Image (tube, coloured by chain):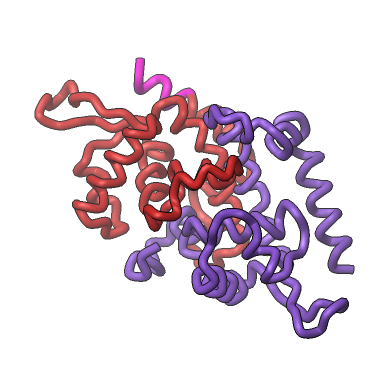
Chain colours: A red, B purple
Amino acid sequence: MSQSAKKHGSGCPVAFALDTFGDRWSLLVLRYPMLRGNETYGEFLESGEGIATNVLADRLKGLEAEGIIDKSPDPDNRRRNIYRLTDKGLDLAPVVMEMIRWAGKYDSSREARKGNVRLIENDSDGFLASLRSRLTGDIQ
Amino acid sequence: MSQSAKKHGSGCPVAFALDTFGDRWSLLVLRYPMLRGNETYGEFLESGEGIATNVLADRLKGLEAEGIIDKSPDPDNRRRNIYRLTDKGLDLAPVVMEMIRWAGKYDSSREARKGNVRLIENDSDGFLASLRSRLTGDIQ
């Protein structure tokens, strides 16, 4: 995302949303703690998309500054942080779910038909509820 | 969006979706024909976000190549094109709606509370149905 394109103040809610999380890597980074639960920095890096360490660090910092994720020391290893979604971040789950649903319809590759796509197609409310309950459980 | 980050082939549906429409300007361009109906090039340019002509031309071309919008000569002025959403593009409306709903919750500016945000909060199914019916009506 071009920085010059941000914070234009048009008042459009789509633009506001995109100013907050609307670049490709931010959304891909968000997806990890959303679909799999809390993540360490290393788990983000190993997630197979080939994100560069500087890009990952930048996006995590940006998402933290926007209050979409927060980090705290891992109880199992205090030298490591655990990243998790805040409520504001969890409220983006419907956006990501609708992307998954759309991709399930238009991506002809077999991979896209698996896992979360089927879950969302069959029971999107249930999927969202289980996500919320799992993530809230992680925090408590 | 960095071109090098595209088409990684991970099979992840979120990545597929972002490869197709996932940069800020593509989504902002998409929003116009989605929320207001078919658009001319001039109407896109005048939409107040300050999009540069070369960026607009590039994103329209990309969205057309992905089959999300198509263009045809304006019956009122054959030297001008009208852009409209295809079915594949219209199926992105739930993604944009969920962004609007999220922004309505977290954008504290007064502008964001108006118009489409209220409609979507009050009756999202009805909003989607009216969008679909209006756009389909435009085509027929």
Q: Position of residue A80 (x, y in %)?
A: 14, 32
Q: Is residue A121 above or below residue B109?
A: below
Magenta-drawn stretch, dominant element (helix, strand or loop): helix
Give B42 or B57, whichever is nearer the viewer: B42
Residue shown at the point (60%, 43%) measured from the top left: A12
Q: Quadrant of residue B44?
A: bottom right
Give A114 or B98, whichever is nearer the viewer: B98
Does residue B15 appear in the picture of this structure?
A: yes
Q: Is residue B127 magenta?
A: no
Q: Is residue A55 above or below residue A17?
A: below
Q: Position of residue B133 (x, y in %)?
A: 85, 54
Please provide the residue range marked out in magenta: A133-140
Q: Is residue A131 above or below residue B90?
A: above
Q: Kindly give the residue lying farthest to the top in the view shown.
A: A140
Q: Quadrant of residue A138?
A: top left
Q: Position of residue B48 (x, y in %)?
A: 61, 54
Q: Position of residue A73 (x, y in %)?
A: 18, 25
Q: Quadrant of residue B86?
A: bottom right
